[in-house]
Amino acid sequence: ARNAQPMRPLRAVALLLVAAAAAAAAATPWAGSGQESGSISKDDFPGDFSFGASTSAYQWEGAAAEDGRTPSVWDTFAHAHAHAGDDSVNGDVAADGYHKYKEDIKLMKETGLDSYRFSISWSRLIPKGRGEINPKGVGYYNNLINELLDHGIQPHATIFQYDLPQILEDEYGGWLSPQIIGDFTAYADVCFREFGDRVTNWTTLNEPNALVSVGYDAGIGPPGRCSKPFGFADCSCGDSVNEPYVVAHNCLLAHTSAVSLYRRKYQTKQHGLIGMNICINNIVPYTNSTEDIAAAKRAQAFYTGWFLDPLYYGDYPLVMKENTGSKLPKFSQSQSKQLINSMDFLGINYYTFLYVKDDPHHAPSNKRNFRADMAAKSIFSSNSTSGFYVPGYGIQQVLEHLKQFYGNPPIYIHENGKYFATIANHKI
């Protein structure tokens, strides 16, 4: 065990870039193209501004069947949707971080990173989802954390990032059941106990607002649940009308349960910080019409207010309650109180600009999914270089929105970057 001082989250925003290469570029002069040109260096930022990289266990570790790890819903989903013999679309090997973490950390140090955000694999740490702890899993994460600290890199740990143990999904439906709250809290307890003497920045859940959409409405992510006519995939099971709301509710309650445990048992001794991460887009009206302006406000409530309003105000946005009817679960008074006090910081994943136009739906609420309840159509602007439109001012507008509506919370930008179909000929 080592003693580590917690890194204070900054109201000026501590920046954790999604790609190590992006952080490398930030440390050296760069030349842009088009209207964007100039130079910038790490020295242009405050001394306590933190640059880092982010990965998730399934996308980075590999070693899917090694040293006691059991399948997660990501394993099941990826293999079910892969073409025969194509291992490039699953995490069986991934970036092989399980075996090459020392090489990767050396590269992080050479790049000039201050921080590294990783997620812990529930299936590796507790292979049966609850109960017996895998000593080899504990050993791996201890080695990873110690290696980071030996290189002067602050570890940021995410407890859950999409990869629920398949055994819990099979047993009781995973996030669809309130039983997940107790199992998640027990899993978080193991993480805090084993690693909290060195990890002082904890994220309970990674972008659960994306999880509920892709996993339980569209069906294009694990566990691949949806129902016609709403899903974007040919799902074998699911209920796009109701399940996203149930899962979101259980995610929020699992978060508060884990936070309460951390503060009761560990925070005063370990001096760490704990929060949640959400996916957030810069949402703007498609036109300046009254209808599109109202639609953009609804979209903001359904996409981000769905989680942020409970976390900062103790309840779902009013427009959600009005548009969803009885489908939206309710918080008790004590649950609302716990939610309001559950965030030491907010983590955000920001990638794109989202135009929104009015799209009214007149079907009864029990025939609508959450997109229809939102009564707004989302338009992802793109260009020929990237799948998403990423103007430089977008993230500033997002931060201004969070400051205005949620009391200027301490923020970590956990993920941020730009997708290229091929990167060989692109300068970052």
Image (cartoon, grey):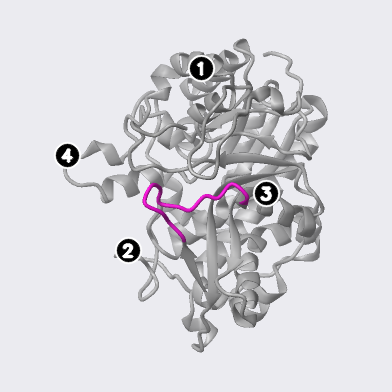
Bin the neighbour count of mark 2 within 10 Å (Cα to Cα): few under 14, some 14-19, many 20 and up.
Answer: some
For the residues labelled 1 and 2, the Cα–Cα distance comes to 38 Å
Mark 1 vs mark 4: give the one in front: 1
The residue that appears at 79% across and 28% down in the rendered structure is 271
Residue 387 is one of the magenta-drawn residues: yes
What is the span of residues highlighted in magenta in the rendered image? 381-393
In the image, what residue type sits under mark 4?
A: Gly
In the image, what residue type sits under mark 2?
A: Ala
Q: Earlier in the sequence, mark 1 or mark 4?
A: 4
Identify residue for label 1: 105
Q: Specify the farthest residue to the top.
A: 150
Drawn side of residue 139 relative to residue 97, left or right: right
For the residues labelled 2 and 3, the Cα–Cα distance comes to 34 Å
Q: Position of residue 255 (x, y in %)?
A: 66, 48
Question: Can residue 97 be seen here?
Answer: yes
For the residues labelled 1 and 4, the Cα–Cα distance comes to 31 Å
In the image, what residue type sits under mark 3?
A: Gln
For the residues labelled 3 and 4, the Cα–Cα distance comes to 44 Å
Identify residue for label 3: 396
